[in-house]
Image (cartoon, helix red, strand yellow):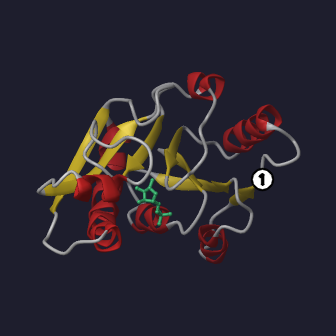
């Protein structure tokens, strides 16, 4: 299957997806809404096709139209969000219905949105984790396709917990994406 990966930053999940590309899926384009994203430089160096465009100055509608065109031109059948920090419009989601997945750093339905690790620690949870889910119009609200759990340890800060969860993300995302595109 042909997958587009959307990033906004570091791109460590994109790298994990790229490392596991093969029989199940290939990455046909890496797109970023932040032209300065570190992950974009990595993708370029890795020889992956890239597309960089910021909505700044052109507006969300024109931005999404250009993004949609670039993904289709690349032959993308699926979209994997990997640290993509922008909300896709209802129209965009509808055009790709059932074919957009995201990785979120919590055990959904707990802790949708931001600051998931601080919230899990503050709540006194014994474990945290990450979820790969279908993207719908509701933020972090689509069907959960797979989850991985990690313990929350005494003395954990949001940063130490994030590191443990991130390692789990890098294992979970390629496996769930491969399953998803095969079914
Ligand atoms: C990850 O924690 C992911 O779950 C969240 O944003 C972070 C992105 O990290 N959506 P990276 O850019 O993949 O390194």
- The kind of secondary structure element at disc 1 is loop
Q: Nearer the viewer, residue 8 or 155?
A: 155
Taking 171 as reference, is 53 left or right? right
Which residue, given by chain and number where applicable, does mark 1 sit on?
A: 53
Taking 96 as reference, is 1 left or right? left
Q: Residues within 10 Å of mark 1 (few under 14, many from 20)?
A: some
Residue 103 coordinates in the image, percent (x, y): 39, 49
Q: Is residue 79 above or below residue 163?
A: above
Identify the residue at the far right of this view: 57
Give the quarter of the image for residue 133: top left
**Beta carbon of the mark 1 residue lies under 8 A of ligand 1:** no
Q: Nearer the viewer, residue 46 or 119?
A: 119
Q: Residue at x 34, y 64 (%)?
A: 170
What is the number of callouts on the image?
1
Taking 145 as reference, is 152 left or right? left
Q: Is residue 169 above or below residue 136?
A: below
Give the quarter of the image for residue 127: bottom left
Quarter of the image where ligand 1 sits: bottom left
Q: Residue at x 43, y 43 (%)?
A: 113
Q: Nearer the viewer, residue 162 or 172?
A: 162
Q: Is residue 62 above or below residue 178?
A: above
Residue 162 coordinates in the image, percent (x, y): 33, 67
Q: Residue at x 25, y 43 (%)?
A: 146
Q: Residue at x 64, y 77 (%)?
A: 45
Residue 49 coordinates in the image, percent (x, y): 67, 61
Taking 24 as reference, is 26 left or right? right
Q: Quadrant of the C terminus?
A: top left
Residue 169 coordinates in the image, percent (x, y): 32, 60
């Amino acid at each position: 299957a042909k997958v587009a990966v959307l990033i906004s930053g570091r791109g460590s999940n994109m790298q994990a997806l790229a490392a596991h590309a093969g029989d199940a899926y290939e990455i046909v384009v890496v797109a970023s809404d932040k032209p300065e994203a570190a992950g974009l430089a990595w993708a370029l160096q890795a020889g992956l096709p890239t597309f960089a465009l910021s909505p700044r100055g052109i507006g969300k509608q024109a931005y999404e139209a250009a993004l949609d065109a670039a993904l289709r031109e690349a032959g993308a059948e699926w979209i994997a969000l990997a640290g993509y920090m922008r909300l896709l419009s209802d129209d965009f989601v509808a055009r790709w219905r059932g074919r957009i997945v995201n990785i979120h750093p919590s055990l959904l339905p707990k802790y949708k949105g931001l600051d998931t690790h601080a919230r899990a620690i503050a709540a006194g949870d014994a474990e945290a984790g990450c979820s790969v889910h279908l993207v719908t119009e509701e933020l972090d609200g689509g069907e959960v396709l797979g989850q991985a759990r990690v313990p929350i340890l005494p003395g954990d800060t949001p940063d130490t917990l994030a590191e443990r969860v991130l390692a789990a993300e890098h294992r979970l995302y390629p496996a769930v994406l491969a399953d998803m595109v095969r079914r």
